[in-house]
Image: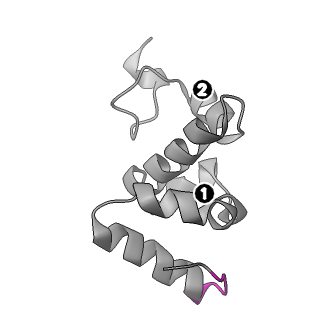
Amino acid sequence: MLQSQRPYFIWNADLSDSDVRAIVAGKRGDLEKIQMIAHIMQNARFDDVWKYIRLDDIVSNWDLVKRMLWPKESKELWQWALQMWGRRVSP
């Protein structure tokens, strides 16, 4: 696979843009979906996060996604943002 086919925030797997979108859509199972959502939240530029995932994807999976965000400040920042946007999420 050519590097240009891989989204810039994916460096640890040989995945294309289509692969990433399929994973986020749940076509490879829930665990991979949750892992990819967290990976995108953590490693993509903020504006690019929304090209791959919806706010509801984050909120509905928050209890699992938050465990995969690091460092702690990343999780806290996302939690604060979600709360500021009127979403109820657990700490």
Tell me what residue is drawn at x 43 percent, y 23 percent. 4
Query: Which residue matches tag 2?
Result: 19
Would residue 16 appear left or right of 68 to someone viewing this image? right
Q: Residue at x 43, y 19 (%)?
A: 14
Q: Which residue type does callout 2 highlight? A: Asp
| Residue holding disc 1 | 50
Amino acid type, callout 1: Trp
Seen at 48% across and 49% down, the residue is 40
**Disc nearer the start of the sequence (2/1):** 2
The image position of residue 12, as x and y in percent, is 34, 29
User: Which segment is the magenta one?
Assistant: 84-88
Q: 41 or 30: nearer the eye?
A: 30
State how the image is colored: one colour
Out of 52 and 4, give the one closest to the viewer.
52
- Residue drawn at the location 39% of the way across and 77% of the way down: 76
Name the quadrant containing residue 71: bottom left
The local secondary structure at tag 2 comes to: helix
In what quadrant of the picture does the N terminus appear?
top left
